[in-house]
Amino acid sequence: MQKIVGYDNRSEEFSELISLLDKNLRLITPADDTELNGDRLCSYQLAHDYLVPSLRDWLTQKQRETKRGRAELKLAERAVTWNLNQENKQLPTILEWVQIRRWTEKHRWTSSEQSLMKTAGRVHLRNASMFVIATILITGLVGYMFQQQSLRSQREKINVALDSLQRTSGPAVAVTIEKLQEMKQPVLVLKDLKSRYAEASGTLEKLSLAVALAHFGWLDADYLVSQIDLIEDRDLGNLVSALSKDPIKGLDALRSAANTCKTPELQHRKARLALAALGLGDTTLPID
């Protein structure tokens, strides 16, 4: 102690200092004597516990002026607490852990400090992994909920448009089909169209559905051609538009139907078939 305080060769002055601190100021008090290499050593301790924090602050004041010093002090403090009570709440926080790793030298850590930092690193890695997994799950769940909400909204819009389609004819059919295409849900629209088409019984509604189906890649050319005598002139354009989605299949159906028109009373039907073929760019279908 005499050497530490700078009184190595000044025994008399050191004795006066100890006497001043002990007997006059009563800041220290003698503790149990100890022996070292046969010599009897007198040790002292602080007389008042409330002096400990102030003394500790004074001793570490210079060390606290640097980031390295503060990190070293935090590591030592946490290590002492961890040794007394090894609970996760006594470990350095993630920020403290990063600062200690950044500003201290690992090879200078004591065994208890190494154990502390190793445990803290493992705990923080586990917590970070759980946080990432939870974030992914929550994000996925929220995304799924929004997707389902959007899907329900799209289905409602599709149903409204299909209800309108089954009640309309002429140019309004093309307008409704365009609205369905703008929804960017071809799979859902096609599925609902097929379902309604299979259940439809009225000529008007089934014809409109058949035209719409052609615009979504599913052409029932034979049915469309079979309706050529029943549809009004304003729906002939819708029929030609539907057949044009697969002109080869459409022309085959028109020629097949025209070949059955052998009698004079069927010439009107054949003329309409030829007119539809002309709309597809074919001029070879004969009109007797």
Image: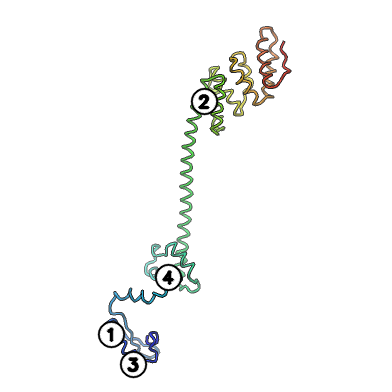
**What amino acid type should be assigned to the residue bearing mark 2?**
Leu
Q: Residue at x 53, y 23 (%)?
A: 165
Q: Front-most of 126 and 48?
A: 48
Q: Which residue is mark 1?
A: 22
Q: Which label is found at residue 30?
A: none
Note whether 56 is above or below 33 in the view shown: above
Q: Is residue 40 left or right of residue 103?
A: left
- N-term mark: 2 or 1: 1
The reply to whether callout 2 and callout 4 are in contact (CB within 8 Å) is: no
**Location of residue 26 (image quadrant):** bottom left
Note whether 48 is above or below 186 in the view shown: below
**What amino acid type should be assigned to the residue bearing mark 4?**
Arg
Q: Which residue is mark 4?
A: 70
Note whether 112 is above or below 5 in the view shown: above
**Location of residue 218 (image quadrant):** top right
Residue 51 drawn at (x, y percent): 30, 76
Q: Secondary structure at mark 4?
A: helix
Distance Cα–Cα, label 3 vs label 4: 38 Å
Q: Which residue is mark 2?
A: 162
Q: Residues within 10 Å of mark 4 (few under 14, many from 20)?
A: many
The reply to whether callout 3 and callout 4 are in contact (CB within 8 Å) is: no
Residue 156 drawn at (x, y percent): 47, 30
Distance Cα–Cα, label 1 vs label 3: 15 Å
Marks 2 and 3: which is nearer the front?
3
Colour scheme shown: rainbow
Q: Which residue is mark 3?
A: 12
- N-term mark: 4 or 1: 1
Q: Secondary structure at mark 2?
A: helix
